[in-house]
Each structure stands twice: as structure tokens, then as C-alpha cells.
Amino acid sequence: MTTSAPTPASILAIDFGGTRTRAAWFNEKLELIQRAETLSQVDQPARSVIARMIETARSVIPEGQLPQAIGIAAPGPLDPQNGIIHYVKTIPNWHEVPLATNVSAAFDNAPTFMQNDGNLAVLAEYHLGAAKGADPALYLTVSTGIGGGAIIDGKLFAGARGMAIEPGHLRFTLPGGEIVRWEQLASGTAIGQIARERLARTDAPSILRDIAQVDGQAVGEAARAGDRFALNLIQETGRWLGLGLVNLIHVFNPRVIVIGGSVSTLGELIFAPAREVIQEHVLHPDFVFEDFIRPPHFGDDVCLYGAALYARERLLSS
């Protein structure tokens, strides 16, 4: 008697973030067939956020079909084995939320596999995208917070309990002695927060004073328009970004660092000062490769591809 090989599956992928929730339907060849997204609205109760997530996911599934597997990319720290989000610093009131169970139940209890969003992003970029074949490879998403993932010796490094890597929680000491997290200095949330604080306590001229909602996106747009206040803030953010990158470079000696997320769209406005700091503080020039900081191949869809890839691998291995 012979045993046939497992059949590749049609997969539902979900990318849950602090700002946006995305969903996509992938065929057996891991081709993206249908995609949708919505605002996460995490200020609402978790049950409302999950209901909206499920509604968005349903909208991408072809009529009459059910997923053979579901992959979920989510912020951490989380328990990937049981599909539970322990808590998220940037999302209020999310504590011990059994996200995978809730999503699975909505789709006829389809096998559901959840993993840290940064881990799934690096999986996609290493196997299919900008970091293909590069080892070690790191991925950073710089957006609402700062997440990340690492491939070492061709394998996803997730740590002893699957909770690695959380680069946004690297600690830095400010000149006044306050200890803060990296994402309090270099994320999109931080950019907006710092801008609002400085506008309130100074009389620095800026077009941002005419904007009702000063967030990271607004500061970025002002910087692109040449606003001096915004440019200075983005350059300062770039220096903090570079300092965190130096720490990661010294720990991992990566061949490639792929940097995605909304803040990365600022391009050279933020990466030029980051590279200057890297050159200034790196222990030895051989740590730095000429092309080692790269944009993601999959852009905003990187976690969707990673979630689909991860779910397919887990399904076939089981």
C-alpha cells in the first residue's frame, strides 16, 4: 500500500495589526487571489475587533469554499502553540486573547496557525522575497510599534517558547535618565506622539499646527513637503532607528535586514541618518554589507504571504 503525498491547500491568511487588519485568499500554488483590508479600530473591545476581522476575512473567500488552513500574523508577545495573544503594548486591553480559536470557529474549525507578525514577514522575505537566500536574515516592521523576525541557518528563530523576536522592546536610556523602549523613539506612533508634545511646549513654526490630527503619517507628509520642524523630527527618529539597528547588527551579524512598515516609506529621509549612526557606532566595517538594508519585496502584503506560507507548511507537516 502506498501513501500519497499531502495535497497543497487553499489558505486564508490574516494580518492583524494595531492600525490595519488585512486578509487574503491564496490558492494551492501560494498565489494571492483576493485581498481586503480594514481599520483594526483597537480602541473597541476585543470581541468587536475580532468580529470585524472575521467579516473582512469572509469577504475574500470564493463563494461556496472554506479554507483548508488559516494563517494569522499577529503582534506579540503571543503563544503560537495555543494561538493566544498574551498582550500587546500598543493595543489597549488585549490580554490573553485566544485569537486563533475564535477565528477557527468562524470557519468550520479549520486548522489555524498563528505566529508573530515579524516572524512571518521574515519567513516570506527569506523564502520568496528581498532576503531570498541571505543568512542570517532579519526583518523589521516599523509602524505602530517595531516588530521583527530572524532566519538563522535557514530556519525561523522563534526562541524557547516561540516568543522571539521583539526588537521594539530594546531599552535605551535618555539623557535625563529615563529608560524607554525602542518603539517609543522610532515607531510611527512615537513620531506622532513626540511631534504633538513638542508643538504643545514650543512655538516652533510648522504646517502641522494647521492639522487636526498630528500623527506619524502627517509628520512624514510635512517632512516630504520640506517643513523644517518635521524634517528635524524625522532625522532624529532616523538616528534612534540607526542606534537600534547597530545593536541588532552586533548581535546577529545579518547578511540582510529587510525593513518594512509605514515608517519605512519615508525612504532616505529616515534611512540616511540611520546609516550615518550605523557607520559611526558599528564595531567593525565588516559587520556592514553594501546592500544589507533592503525594502520588502511584498510591501504591505508581506505578513499575508508569510501567514499563508506558514499555514501551508504547518498543515503539510501535520
Image (cartoon, rainbow, N blue to C red):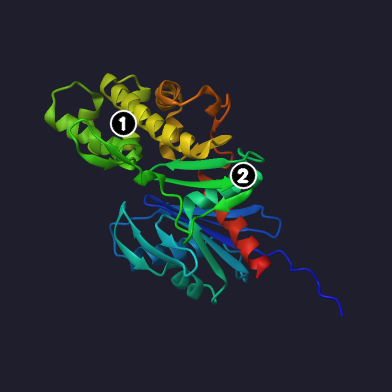
Q: Position of residue 290 (x, y in %)?
A: 58, 24
Nearer to the camera, 100 or 132: 132
Can residue 144 be seen?
no
Residue named by callout 2: 126
- The residue that appears at 59% across and 55% down in the rendered structure is 34
Quarter where residue 70 is shown: bottom right
- The residue that appears at 47% across and 39% down in the rendered structure is 251
Q: Amino acid at mark 2?
A: Tyr
Q: Earlier in the sequence, mark 2 or mark 1?
A: 2
Nearer to the camera, 232 or 290: 290
| Numbered disc 1: secondary structure | helix
In the rendered view, does 129 fall on the left or right side of 144? right
Q: Amino acid at mark 1?
A: Val
Q: Position of residue 285 (x, y in %)?
A: 52, 22
Can residue 66 be seen?
yes
Residue named by callout 1: 219
Task: Tell me if residue 143 comes above or below residue 115 in the rendering.
Answer: above
Quadrant assignment for the N terminus: bottom right
| Callout in the foreground (2, 1) | 2
Direction front: furthest residue: 283
Direction bottom: furthest residue: 1
